[in-house]
Image (cartoon, grey):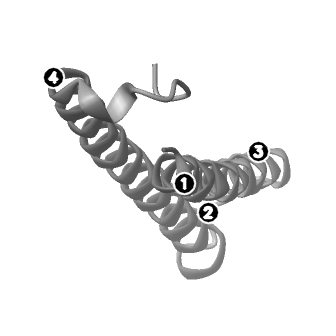
Amino acid sequence: MASTDDFSSATAFLYLSLALALLDIYALLITCTLTFAAACASAGITVLLANDLDNCEVSQCIRFETATGMAFLSWFAISPSFFFNFWSLATTK
């Protein structure tokens, strides 16, 4: 709908797309924040078990560190998605 020439003349569709854009931004911000918080929490538990308590088996620590690394990688994957979606919403007619 936004790619047509007379999209801005239909105010109902304009307000609908604005509401959906705000909802999309809010959902991506919440998802990005929760993913980063989960990655930081898993890193804290890994450091606690490995360094502070010295209670970490070799295979168990490798699994925890791998899970923490994947959590941060997923956060880095979500962040560009948020910025590109926000940019594409801002540049549409």
Whole-angstrom CA distance, mark 2 to mark 4, is 60 Å
Whole-angstrom CA distance, mark 3 to mark 4, is 51 Å
Whole-angstrom CA distance, mark 4 to mark 1, is 20 Å
Q: Which residue is mark 4?
A: 12
Asked which secondary structure carries label 1, the reply is helix
Badge 3 local density, few (<14 within 10 Å), some, or many (20+)? few
| Residue plotted at (70% across, 50% down) | 77
Which-is-in-front pick, marks 2 and 1? Answer: 1
Q: Residue furthest bottom?
A: 52
Which-is-in-front pick, marks 2 and 4? Answer: 4
- The image quarter containing residue 20 is top left
Looking at the rendered structure, the kind of residue marked 1 is Thr
Looking at the rendered structure, the kind of residue marked 2 is Asn
Callouts 3 and 2 close, C-beta under 8 Å: no
Badge 2 local density, few (<14 within 10 Å), some, or many (20+)? few
| Residue plotted at (54% across, 54% down) | 91
Whole-angstrom CA distance, mark 2 to mark 1, is 53 Å
Residue 55, labelled with which disc?
A: 2
